[in-house]
Amino acid sequence: MTISGGSMRTLGSWQPPVYCPENTFAKEFSHITDIDTDTSLGYQYDDTATQSLILYCYDLDGVYVSSVASNKHYSGVQSEKLKCSDDNNFLQGINLKVGPPHLAIVSIGMACANAD
């Protein structure tokens, strides 16, 4: 699975692609964001965009093997793991919606497919 910047304006740089080990597949993922609180607005927000995406890799029997991260030098807060709802499903794609004011990811959707 590859995520690219497309034609959007970016701040920072894209990291090299990372993949699950051979014969394993991503079944869960989480992301790291740097959360800050704007006291004038009174709420928390992601002030530096997503720092890293983490894929959790499983074999075809559903046994966890390892994880890979797009950026190992991150700071911030890790989200809860998002996973495919069916145990036989693996992650097939991610849809990232980027929005203002800081061009940060504002929502993440995922698509799962059956391993059979």
Image (tube, helix red, strand yellow):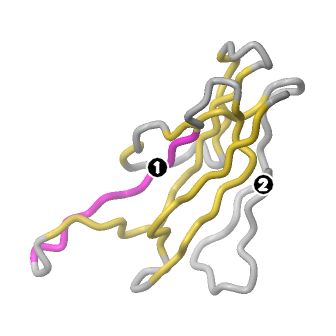
Please indicate whether residue 63 sits to the left or right of residue 39 in the image.
Answer: right
Q: What are the residue bounds of the magenta stretch? A: 29-39
Callout 2: SS = loop
Q: Circle 2 sits on which residue?
A: 16
Q: Position of residue 41 (x, y in %)?
A: 14, 79
**Real-space Cα separation, disc 2 to disc 1, in angstroms:** 17 Å
Name which residue lies at 76% across and 34% down.
114
Q: Position of residue 76 (x, y in %)?
A: 38, 49
> Quadrant of the image for the C terminus?
top right
Q: Main secondary structure of the magenta part?
A: strand
Of circles 2 and 1, the one toward us is 1
Contact, mark 2 vs mark 1 (Cβ under 8 Å): no
Q: Nearer the viewer, residue 29 or 54?
A: 29
Q: Relative to 3, is 53 above or below?
A: above
Q: Relative to 6, is 59 above or below?
A: above
Q: Circle 1 sits on which residue?
A: 32
Q: Nearer the viewer, residue 34 or 93?
A: 93
Q: Earlier in the sequence, mark 2 or mark 1?
A: 2
Residue type, mark 2 in image: Pro
Q: Nearer the viewer, residue 24 or 42?
A: 24
Looking at the image, which residue sits at the far right? 22
Q: Is residue 36 magenta?
A: yes
Q: Relative to 109, is 101 above or below?
A: below
Name which residue lies at 70% across and 25% down.
88
Please indicate whether residue 110 sits to the left or right of residue 58 in the image.
Answer: left
Name which residue lies at 22% across and 64% down.
44
Callout 1: SS = strand
